[in-house]
Amino acid sequence: MNRKIFIPLFVLLLATISGSKLFAQKDHKPADTAIVSDNLEKEEEDIIEDIIKKRVPPQKDKVEYFSQVTKYGFKNLFSGFSYNTSLPYTSQVNPYAESFMQDYLKAHGASLVKMKGWAQPYFNLIESILVQYGLPRELKYVAVIESNLKTAATSGVGAGGPWQFMPYTARDYGLTVNNYIDERRDYYKSTHAAARYLLTLYRQLHDWLLVFAAYNGGPGRVYSAMKKSGSRNFWNLQYYLPQESRNYVKKFIATHYIMEGSDKLNTQPSLSGITDKSGFQPNPGPYTDPFATNKPKLNDQENADVEILAVSGKFNSLVIAKNLSMDITVFNKYNPNFDMMLSSNGNYDMRLPADKMSLFVSNKYQILNECVQLMLGDEPIISPVKNTAPKKTKTTKQKV
């Protein structure tokens, strides 16, 4: 080859290679990484599509993989993609987050701290369902923002239940809503529907902060903010969102901070000045609930009809109440801090009206089976014990 021709060709080739490298560096996405990323994203979308279509959690062999995929949705909130309880909160949360949630903490911090005690059974229930879908457990705080975990919550526009579904959205995700049945208020079914809906939003946005904004204001507004800002990063596009949606994300971060991080910090700049009527302020160290009392406040008639049973094992107050057709608030009146005390002590002197106690004892194995199944997200445990109704004995402790 002519030397004069060879040299320009060599320079052109070198420039082409250099340009390709610069382009890859600029996009932070080399060609081989892009192929791997696209393949993973396609696999992720296929799994989500299957879940939404069948309206059931993914198969167990996919849950572990999927839990790794969905945790990356917190890449713009936590430096390690998820919150590490062994590290100080402020060392791993996005620097934008602290100032972003200050005003919400001042207004609602005390009630959120108080919720840490009474809400534990609700959180246990929601988490047990979220993990079946490979979803981050932090998503349970969406129900806190939406309804304060209340099944009876109803918005002015007709959204209902702990996850505040509109009727048409609820039906789209498998819930029955008509003049006779409203499954939006069923904790179990509505949480399964919420998990599927959150997955649908995640499939579109791949970022949990954007998902929260979309849960509040709809994905269309998030896409509009992306287009106007030229970014998919919440912190860059936040001011192109409606204020309500922007504040919704702020509420989530503040709620997560209170529930997960406030009792593990050496310093608490965001919690200074937060007190409730008793003067309580959250302090570093192991959490203790100053509001807790284990003595039920029953009237004379209720005390006359009460029966006591010493229970142990993985019982869950919501499952018990459901099986006994009791309102959870009534069950909690008879058994304050049931889940927390049973979990920490291993046993609890459960109090129930005589008829409810008889029903519990005759179905205790089925109830325990459902509690364990809920906790593990596993197949039912078949009990060999035949259930029989016990003889009624007033205030006599029995052992399960």
Image: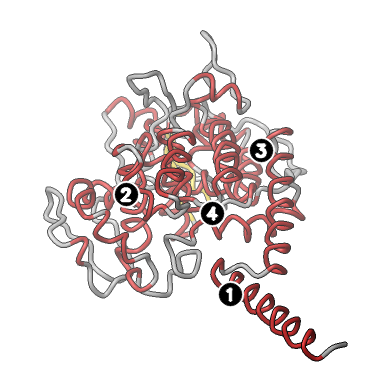
Q: CA distance from mark 4 to mark 3?
A: 29 Å
Q: CA distance from mark 2 to mark 1?
A: 37 Å
Q: Quadrant of the N terminus?
A: bottom right
Which residue appears at 16% of the width and 55% of the height?
A: 274
Residue 125 shown left or right of residue 132 in the figure? left
Q: Residues within 10 Å of mark 3 (few under 14, many from 20)?
A: some
Q: In front: mark 3 or mark 2?
A: 2
Q: Earlier in the sequence, mark 1 or mark 4?
A: 1
Label 1 sits on what residue type? Leu
Q: Nearer the viewer, residue 132 or 246?
A: 246
Residue 366 numbered mark, or none: 3
Q: Earlier in the sequence, mark 2 or mark 4?
A: 4
The reply to whether discs 2 and 4 touch (Cβ–Cβ < 8 Å) is no
**Residue identifier under label 2:** 250
The reply to whether discs 3 and 1 touch (Cβ–Cβ < 8 Å) is no
Label 2 sits on what residue type? Lys
Residue 340 shown left or right of residue 282 in the figure? right
The reply to whether discs 4 and 3 touch (Cβ–Cβ < 8 Å) is no
Residue 173 shown left or right of residue 224 in the figure? right
Compared with residue 22, is residue 355 higher up or lower down, i.e. above or below? above
Q: Earlier in the sequence, mark 2 or mark 1?
A: 1
**Residue identifier under label 1:** 22
Q: Secondary structure at mark 1?
A: helix
Q: CA distance from mark 2 to mark 4?
A: 18 Å
**Residue identifier under label 4:** 136
Q: Residue furthest right?
A: 1
The reply to whether discs 3 and 2 touch (Cβ–Cβ < 8 Å) is no
Q: How many marks?
A: 4
Q: Secondary structure at mark 4?
A: loop
Q: CA distance from mark 3 to mark 1?
A: 64 Å
Label 4 sits on what residue type? Pro
